Image (tube, grey):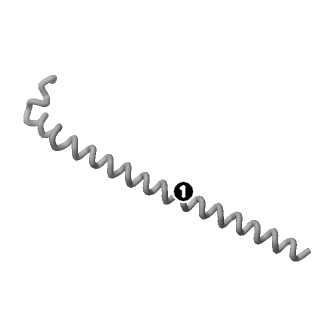
Amino acid sequence: MSDFHKTAKGQKFYEGDLPRLVNALEKISNQLQSLNEREERKFKLDERLKRQEIKKNKDELNESK
């Protein structure tokens, strides 16, 4: 098995299959990173909206007193 790289299947694996696999993994990684960044931005916006809503409710409560 140490001469696998010398066989036709070994050359196909190292020259074709393996580079395609690495490219596919890089694409998956990039997509996950993009998804995580979008989710983080969404989370931050949701938190900001919640804080604004809480502040608005407090202000309305103070005005009604």
Work out which residue is located at the far bottom of the displayed protein and give it. Answer: 64
- In the displayed structure image, the side of residue 27 where residue 8 appears, left or right: left
Tell me the kind of residue under disc 1: Glu
What x and y, as percent, mark residue 61? Answer: 85, 72
Q: Is residue 23 above or below residue 59?
A: above
What x and y, as percent, mark residue 62? Answer: 87, 72
Q: Is residue 62 above or below residue 18?
A: below
Q: Which quarter shows the C terminus?
A: bottom right
What x and y, as percent, mark residue 39? Answer: 52, 58
Residue assigned mark 1: 40
Q: Which quarter shows the N terminus?
A: top left
Residue at left offset 49%, top offset 60%: 38
Picture quarter containing residue 47? bottom right
Picture quarter containing residue 57? bottom right
The local crowd at label 1, few if under 14, some if 14 to 19, many if 20 or more residues have their Cα within 10 Å, is few
What x and y, as percent, mark residue 23? Answer: 27, 48
Residue at left offset 43%, top offset 52%: 33
- In the displayed structure image, the side of residue 64 where residue 14 appears, left or right: left
Mark 1 residue element: helix
